[in-house]
Image (cartoon, rainbow, N blue to C red):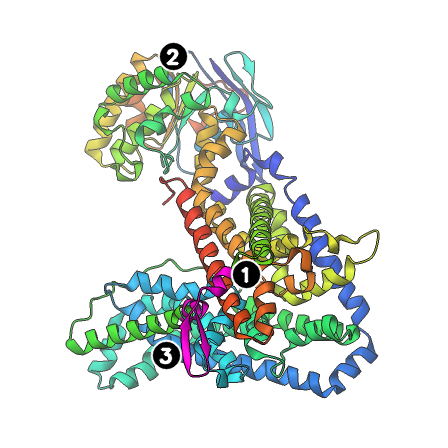
């Protein structure tokens, strides 16, 4: 499971997160909602270790994460703007985490092909990522984060900027995929409808900080 | 949301290792730049020294000549380059890119070779004249106008000029009242760069100006090395440093806060009317001929010997190339260039990564890395000569001192090429890599390295080309036992005799071929999948 306790993050006298606490059970999909600027993305980045909280603790799988760098945290983060590696093809983007973890070539091929068929993009393996449509790029970004089976998947506004029809379809596909793999997910969005459709529990990020109140 | 706040508290995977990257470049700059220039200032800045210098008629003449030839060179470069700039930036035609590449070649040539090429192409009446010198400077600097002014000209919408035409202006009036004012700033920038190059020109002046045409740079050499007037040489170096610093200060002030505007180039159109076709191809062919002529003259003169009344074909120049002295110069130059390439690229990379990833406070590192631009190559050579010539610091006699001086000259360019590319690598990619389990080293190797390899390759090629042609600092530091190609060429050209000259021309051809091969090889070596 994931437990955030009293996470506070100040920057230049401004409080971005004020003693936020949250716990997520294994296999649970939680959506954090709230207007822009409310600290949702920052909270995801704190979980991933991309940002250092001024105080508070992050516990993942019963291990205290203080001082543990991002690459040792076993989290997957899907960025709002995908951040696909422009110098690698679709296959190599998805294989990236397997490659840096020195997984054997044969297993890399097997796992990446499995992901590609799960997202229905077997034909695009060697495609240049610059030639992908918005929906395709998003699927690749999710596949890349999931391929090494991270303990927690973090989704940062995953459907922002896509047209309504595509959002609907991706929402269905992603929900099915995550549930089938029993992935633990923290999902950030400003769209309530998206949150209720994808997740088991919806939490307003502004209520995380109400002192001492543990939200359920 | 608060992007600024985020980036400032964001944890870069490289922060802890990048913290130490400032040390090696700083030590290098202190040893090779700061200490030698300080030595020049401490030993040369005396009242008597300046009084003598300013009262010396030879020196006064050199100062005057340096200034007016720089202005004349700038004017001639603009006159020759503007027609080519116009057709290259305005018209799409077969050979456009090839012509752009061709115009870049003179700028990459060693200055001694440019001087030699004009000795080869001009009749002997023009040798050692101001005219020859100014023409050679214009030849060398063509690309400066084409690049700087061309970039602006491409962005001018043709509609503006068409509007002026409909309002009754003739083509010439349009150029004078609309185009020229809009190009004004780019023209001023290009002129500044050319004037700076012409002002500090040394290799071209030494080969083509002869003893009669002294500039500040050659006068520093003559006084310190040939006639042993060290106080005069030091005082002149200080004058040169003051002028250069003032020019670069003016330059930095002009461009402060100016960001590189995105290259929105208006679609070039193919020449449509018969007149346009004639104009475009006429100018393009004439420019190509101007660029090629001195180089082919070099090749031709390396294969022929002119005796009164006849020109005959000979391989004697090329046969002399295989003598042990010239073979030694070729291997020395190649070795020096490889060393300088490695040193300048590694140090430049350290500066770029330190500035980009170390800490926002490291901006000073970027600033000091461009300082070598404020000192001319001759001053760098002189400074090293007077600083490291006594025990226990007698490094002047070690061979590595020359490649170190070359690295210093190449360093600002390496930083200028690599740093913007490092800055453009999206930080998000590094975050993704670390969430996917990559260690900082793996992240650098799999994300940053491939995205910056093209820029690093280009800067390495330029460092190699600078080193193999470098003449200013080298002429102070070279020893007969480890002479470089440009020094050998200059020595052969300064002696009477057609045989030696033929040999010098053959060596020029070799140095051109080596630089072009290096640039080509480094271009080939870089990975095929590259950053967009």
Quarter holding the N terminus of chain B is: top left
Residue B25 in percent (x, y) is at 65, 48
Q: Quadrant of residue A124?
A: top left
Query: Which labelled disc corresponds to residue B418?
Result: none
Mark 3–mark 2 distance (CA, rounded to whole Å): 68 Å
Q: Chain of mark 3?
A: B
* Residue B304 image-quadrant placement: bottom left
Q: CA distance from mark 1 to mark 3?
A: 36 Å
Residue A202 seen from this side: no
Q: Position of residue B203 (x, y in %)?
A: 57, 70
Residue B527 highlighted magenta (yes or no) = no
Q: Nearer the viewer, mark 3 or mark 2?
A: 3
Mark 2 burial class by Cα count in 10 Å: few <14, some 14-19, many 20+ = some
Contact check, label 1 and label 3, Cβ < 8 Å: no
The percent position of residue B211, horizontal first and vertical second, equals 63, 80
Q: Residue at x 43, y 18 (%)?
A: A152
**Residue B165 shows in this picture:** yes
The answer for which chain carries disc 1 is B
Residue segment shown in magenta: B297-320
Label 3: which residue?
B180
The residue that mark 1 highlights is: B469
Specify few, some or many for label 3: CA neighbours under 10 Å numbering under 14, 14-19, or 20 or more.
Answer: some
The residue pinned by badge 2 equals A27
Which marked residue is nearer to the observer: mark 1 or mark 3?
1
Q: Quick check: marks 1 and 2 in contact, CB under 8 Å?
A: no
């Amino acid at each position: 499971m994931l437990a955030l306790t009293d996470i506070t993050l100040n920057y230049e006298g401004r409080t971005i997160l004020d003693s936020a606490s949250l716990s997520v059970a294994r296999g649970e999909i939680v959506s954090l909602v709230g207007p822009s600027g409310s600290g949702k993305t920052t909270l995801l980045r704190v979980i991933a270790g991309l940002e250092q909280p001024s105080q508070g603790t992050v516990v993942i799988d019963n291990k205290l994460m203080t001082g543990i760098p991002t690459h040792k945290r076993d989290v997957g983060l899907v960025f709002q703007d995908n951040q696909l590696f422009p110098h690698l093809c679709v296959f190599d983007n998805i294989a990236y985490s397997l490659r840096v973890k020195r997984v054997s070539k044969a297993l890399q091929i097997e796992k990446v092909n499995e992901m590609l068929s799960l997202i229905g993009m077997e034909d695009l393996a060697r495609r240049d990522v610059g030639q992908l449509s918005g929906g395709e790029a998003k699927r690749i970004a999710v596949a890349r984060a999931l391929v090494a089976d991270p303990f927690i998947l973090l989704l940062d506004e995953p459907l922002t900027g896509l047209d309504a029809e595509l959002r609907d379809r991706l929402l269905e596909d992603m929900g099915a995929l995550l549930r089938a793999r029993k992935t633990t997910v923290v999902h950030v969005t400003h769209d309530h409808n998206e949150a209720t459709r994808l997740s088991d529990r919806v939490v307003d990020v502004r209520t995380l900080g109400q002192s001492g109140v543990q939200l359920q | 949301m608060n992007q600024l706040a985020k980036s400032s508290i964001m944890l870069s995977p490289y922060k802890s290792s990048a913290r130490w990257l400032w040390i090696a470049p700083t030590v290098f700059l202190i040893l090779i730049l700061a200490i030698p220039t300080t030595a020049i200032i401490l030993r040369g800045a005396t009242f008597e020294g300046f009084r003598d210098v300013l009262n010396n008629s030879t020196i006064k003449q050199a100062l005057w000549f340096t200034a007016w030839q720089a202005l004349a060179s700038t004017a001639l470069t603009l006159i020759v380059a503007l027609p080519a700039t116009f057709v290259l930036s305005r018209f799409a035609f077969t050979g456009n890119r090839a012509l752009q590449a061709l115009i870049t070649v003179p700028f990459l040539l060693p200055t001694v070779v440019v001087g030699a090429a004009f000795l080869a192409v001009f009749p002997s009446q023009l040798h050692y004249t101001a005219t020859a010198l100014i023409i050679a400077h214009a030849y060398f600097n063509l690309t400066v106008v084409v690049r700087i002014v061309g970039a602006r000209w491409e962005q001018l919408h043709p509609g503006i000029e068409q509007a002026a035409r409909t309002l009754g202006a003739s083509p010439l009036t349009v150029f004078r009242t609309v185009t020229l004012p809009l190009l004004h700033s780019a023209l001023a920038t290009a002129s500044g760069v050319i004037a700076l190059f012409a002002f500090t020109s040394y290799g071209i002046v030494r080969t083509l100006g002869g003893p009669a045409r002294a500039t500040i740079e050659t006068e520093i050499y003559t006084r310190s090395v040939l006639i042993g007037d060290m106080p005069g040489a030091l005082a002149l170096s200080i004058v040169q440093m003051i002028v250069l610093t003032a020019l670069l200060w003016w330059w930095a002030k002009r461009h402060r806060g100016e960001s590189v505007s995105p290259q929105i180039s208006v679609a070039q159109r193919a020449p449509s009317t018969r007149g346009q076709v004639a104009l475009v191809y006429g100018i393009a062919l004439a420019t190509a001929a101007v660029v090629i002529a001195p180089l082919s003259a070099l090749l031709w003169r390396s294969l022929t010997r002119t005796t009164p009344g006849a020109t005959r074909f000979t391989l004697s120049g090329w046969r002399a190339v295989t003598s042990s002295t010239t073979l030694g110069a070729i291997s020395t130059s190649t070795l020096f260039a490889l060393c300088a390439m490695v040193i300048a690229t590694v140090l430049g990379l350290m500066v770029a990564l330190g500035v980009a990833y170390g800490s926002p406070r490291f901006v000073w590192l970027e600033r000091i890395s461009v300082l070598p631009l404020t000192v001319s190559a001759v001053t760098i050579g002189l400074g090293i000569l007077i600083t490291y010539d006594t025990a226990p610091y007698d490094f002047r006699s070690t061979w590595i001192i020359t490649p170190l001086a070359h690295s210093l000259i190449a360093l600002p360019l390496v930083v200028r090429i690599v740093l913007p590319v490092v800055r453009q690598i999206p930080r998000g990619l590094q975050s993704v890599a670390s969430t996917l389990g990559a260690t900082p080293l793996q992240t650098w190797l799999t994300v940053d390295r491939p995205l910056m390899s093209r820029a690093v390759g280009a800067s390495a090629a330029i460092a190699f080309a600078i080193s193999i042609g470098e003449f200013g600092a080298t002429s102070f530091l070279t020893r007969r036992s480890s002479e470089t190609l440009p020094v050998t060429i200059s020595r052969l050209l300064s002696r009477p005799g057609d045989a030696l000259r033929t040999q010098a021309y053959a060596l020029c051809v070799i140095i051109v071929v080596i630089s072009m091969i290096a640039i080509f090889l480094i271009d080939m070596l870089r990975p095929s999948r590259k950053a967009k």
